Image: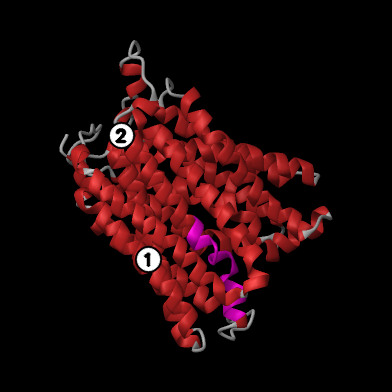
Amino acid sequence: MSTTSASTDRFPWAAMTAIGFTVFATVTSEFLPTGMLPSMSADLNVSTSQIGFLVSVWAATVVLTAIPMSLTTRRFSRKSLLIVSVGLFTVSNVMASLAPTYDVLFASRIIGGLGNGMFWMIATGYVTTMLPAQWRSRGFLFISAGANLAFIAGLPLGSALAALSDWRAGFLIMTALTIGASVGLYFLLIPVPNPHTENPGEVHSVIRDRSFRMVLLGVSGVFLVVGGGNMFYPYIAPFLIEVAHFTPLTVAVPLAAYGVGGTIGIVVAERLGRRPENLSRNISISILYMASMMILLNLVAGSPVAAIVACALWSLGFAVTEPLFGQYIMELSSPRLRDFAGAMRTTAWNLGIGSGSFIGGVLLVPLGITALPYLGASVLVGGATIALIARRRERALWAN
């Protein structure tokens, strides 16, 4: 497919570092409550499940607003919208750090969800437009690295702060980080052309865009991959304790291995993403690998050492698949469709998390925790099938 780029032949290290840091700050902001459940619950005098809802309402806000925002903000500067989106994270974190009641904290998460939907509807398309084809896989590496670092370092640090000081300190630190991210984007980010303002007289419908069907196919694959993975992942800690016989203390070891596997995976994804014409093939292979590793973890869980290795291998598969899918959707999108495609992708991502974890929770009791890897793997096979179907249909787009 024909693409446009706002970049030169040199890789924009400063701009991509700013984007990677922003991803780290925003992802940490999103999931920070998960590491501070007990202290937040005690301080606000609410149940642990109510604190858990703070992550759910964030995701629900993204699902409900990302696509409408992509349609209503099409005429605005992409760089300005990115900075505004991070500003909403800052407002959310300030409100959370000062929240006198649970209701105020809840409202702060809605504002953060708005910022999240706006950020992710633009970020991947922005990188695709800013970078020439030979640098795009490296650009997506920065995005994935920022998110991975949030889970490896950001969330544990937030949990430690809550234990040593106060949960509000975690949100204050995130306020400082998101302000820093906004400043970095303002000074370091390379502006990109907005295709919706360059041809103001052109009547355009996203549904009539020739790349829309392929994007919709890719987004469906994202939903199945994230949904299948999250049928099992939210319950990985109790699985490791119950089946692999880790203790609540030692379960941190396989979870750390999961983080290491993810770090390796995003590096592998960068190399695989260097040839866009092979993305759908590599995606289907990585999804099937991921499904196999979920089943392998279930089969070898009787051995703690084998379970640790299997956790790392499973994470590697997901860390390869997700950025490749993101790059694939952006590569196939026409420049005019990229923001809408980004909104569809983040909507599918959050729907996958919510529906996958919900279905896994519903089936956990009647089927048992050891059934979840098989159920999740079966959904992943559906995602691999979509990638294979897409490979058969994409040749006409790559030819133009």
Q: Nearer the viewer, residue 228 or 7?
A: 228
Q: In this picture, is 80 found above or below 343?
A: above
Taking the image as drawn, is residue 253 in sight?
Answer: yes
Which amino acid type is marked by label 1?
Gly
Helix, strand, or loop for circle 2? loop
Quadrant of image for the N terminus: top left
Q: Nearer the viewer, residue 203 or 386?
A: 386
Percent x, y of residue 123: 41, 39
The residue positioned farthest toward the right in the image shown: 45
- Residue marked by disc 1: 317
Picture disc at residue 211: 2
Quadrant of image for the C terminus: top left
> Left or right: where does residue 257 sit relative to residue 200?
right
The image quadrant of residue 46 is bottom right
Magenta: predominant secondary structure element?
helix
Taking the image as drawn, is residue 160 in sight?
Answer: no
For marks 2 and 1, give the CA distance.
Answer: 27 Å
Is residue 206 found inside the magenta-colored segment of the image?
Answer: no
Q: Which residues are magenta?
A: 227-241
The image quadrant of residue 219 is top left
The residue positioned farthest toward the top in the image shown: 201
Which amino acid type is marked by label 2?
Ser
